Image: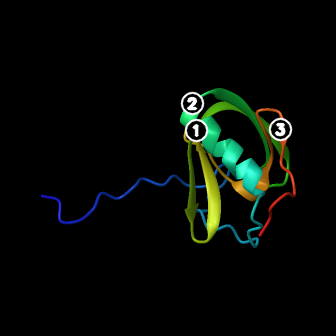
Amino acid sequence: MATGPAQRDVPESHASDRNETMDEPYTPISCAFYDRLEILAMRKTPTTIRYRDDDDHEQQIAAVVVDVYSKHKQEWVKLDDGTTIRLDRLISADGHPLSDECQS
């Protein structure tokens, strides 16, 4: 018998044993890039994501963006294979590079 709202299953950070509270301070990404990620999630279009892993190595993955969310004052993207990437680790999505526009 449920006594409260459903808990959303939030996966652990990609490529390490760290959870979603990475040690480095979070740097907000541009509004335009965040919007692009949300559009990719709505369309469920396969895309290429380039990012820096926990060891600061550039990685590339082909996947579908399934969620863009905030947790612990950090923003994350979840991919269809379960991978989660903190948004300030992204380099590009769908061939569009992360830009400096609209950072807060």
Q: Which class describes the residues within 10 Å of circle 1: few (<14), some (14-19), or many (20+)?
A: many
Name the spot of residue 62 as percent of width and height, x first: 70, 29
How far apart marks 2 and 1 lie (CA) works out to: 5 Å
Q: Amino acid at mark 3?
A: His
The residue tagged 1 is 41
Which quarter shows the N terminus? bottom left
Q: Is residue 80 visible?
A: no
Q: Residue furthest top?
A: 46
Asked whether the beta carbons under mark 3 and mark 2 sit within 8 Å of each other, the answer is: no
Q: Residue at x 48, y 55 (%)?
A: 10
| Residue type pointed to by label 1 | Ala
Instruction: Measure how far apart labels 3 and 2 are at the Cα level.
Output: 17 Å
**In terms of sequence position, does the residue under pointer 3 or pointer 2 come before the other?**
2
Can residue 60 be seen here? The reply is yes
Residue 91 in percent (x, y) is at: 83, 46
The circle drawn on residue 96 is 3
